[in-house]
Image (cartoon, rainbow, N blue to C red):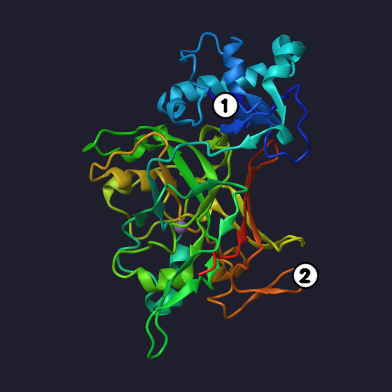
Amino acid sequence: MPLSANDPSKKTWLNVPAGSDFPIQNIPFGVFLTRDDVITIGTRIGDTAIDLGALHQLGYFDGIELTDDIFLQDSLNDFIADGRKTWRLVRNRISDIFLESNPALRDHSAHKKTVLFGLDEIEMQLPVDVGDYTDFYASKEHATNVGSLFRDPEHALLPNWLHIPIGYHGRSSSIVPSGTPIRRPNGQVAPKEGNGPGFGPTKLLDFELEMAFITTAANDLGKPIPIEETAEYIFGLVLFNDWSARDIQGWEYVPLGPFLGKNFASTISPWIVTLDALNSFRVSGPKQDPTPLPYLQQEGAHNYDIHLQASIKPHGGEESLVCHSNFKYMYWSMAQQLAHHTVNGCNVRSGDMMGSGTISGPTPDSYGSMLELSWKGQRPLTLSDGTKRAFINDGDTVIMRGYCENDQVRIGFGECTGEVLPARPL
Ligand code: MN
């Protein structure tokens, strides 16, 4: 099926500000609460939110096989479960409805009143009910930095790293949409000489600059997904801040891996940008040496050129850019992650979320966490107000942004933000 919605020459009758992340070629999917307190599935063009539930009721999706209530839901799980053919039909149809030359909705003011909302009239919700959340560790630069900081720079990567997309099962209950405040967690930390373990608010609160992909129901239990089929099961991507408490993590993670230092909060951007919308931004990934096992081998361009940024904004202050990275640095692609995840027969369901792991680039200003940017606190960053940061302070808002751009079109993700609140008193 052609991805006609991606045609860069298309123009819309809606206003799209210059430099917007959401031209008519994007057409992401999200869930929002309207001014009338109705929850609906929607999309966004420019700064206009579009109620897909209302559009469907008005007949604008006639001819596409959809249940009546497919968009009148508080999550995208059922729509995602309909599969790639339906996603493409719907995205192409939305593109047609808002095409400059199409008068059907453009000239129907009563319908427009029901369907279109300003961004100040809606409240974005979590787009999916995340059943299972898996976090990978797929950036070689990040794994090398962390290995150097905590173990041995000479043997920074553990022997398995170049053979396996390393991951762990995270917790979905604490995944929150952009804008949700984050409470600094209390927890246990390593003993200092002669004493027992400490307990209190984390002193080493960090962000992790990640992306996450969201899957459809992919396979039955026991049946692996071959790597060449994985793209069919990836609905789209969001920005992902996998908040981390490094001191809690450092004490607890041996031998079973991350636990309370990771599962207190993870923030996602609320609009899922489809894999289809990113199609023209595919690039080759880093050369893989040694060659992975056959089930992880792939041909062609499987990485995506997505510019990523993280900023810190102190309460009432100005924003300082602290990192710019790119999703294309990922050593293990999403296709490899999904093939690996299912090679043992583990089943993946609609609405599952797979985090990439922190995406660090090759230069010190492209590291995707404060742990790396400040080199474990040894080199604090100076913000634009002159204050220093080794980790994240109370009152700081961490803002992540991501976008793809060529000379024809820009496809972006909007923002993924969260302000850190002081810990609960002990
Ligand atoms: Mn993570």
Name the residue beneath numbered marker 1. Answer: 40
For residue 385, which numbered disc appears in the image?
A: 2
Q: Is mark 2 within 8 Å of ligand 1?
A: no
**Left or right relative to 207: residue 336:** left
Q: Is mark 1 within 8 Å of ligand 1?
A: no
Q: Identify residue type, mark 2.
A: Asp
For label 2, the crowd category at 10 Å Cα-Cα, with few meaning under 14, some 14 to 19 and many 20 or more, is few
Decide which of tag 1 and tag 2 comes sooner along the chain.
1
Tell me: residue 130, above or below residue 170.
Answer: above
Measured as percent of width and height from the top left, residue 359 is found at 51, 58
Look at the numbered disc 1 and give the secondary structure of its residue.
strand
For label 1, the crowd category at 10 Å Cα-Cα, with few meaning under 14, some 14 to 19 and many 20 or more, is many
Q: Nearer the viewer, residue 179 or 273?
A: 179
**Left or right relative to 279: residue 157:** left
Measured as percent of width and height from the top left, residue 240 is found at 53, 50
Circles 1 and 2: CB distance less than 8 Å? no
3D distance between C-alphas at marks 1 and 2:
41 Å
Q: Residue at x 77, y 11 (%)?
A: 107
**Left or right relative to 384: residue 27:** left
Q: Identify residue type, mark 1.
A: Thr
Give the quadrant of residue 222: top left
Give the quadrant of residue 346: top left
Q: Residue at x 67, y 35 (%)?
A: 22
Nearer to us of marks 1 and 2 is 1
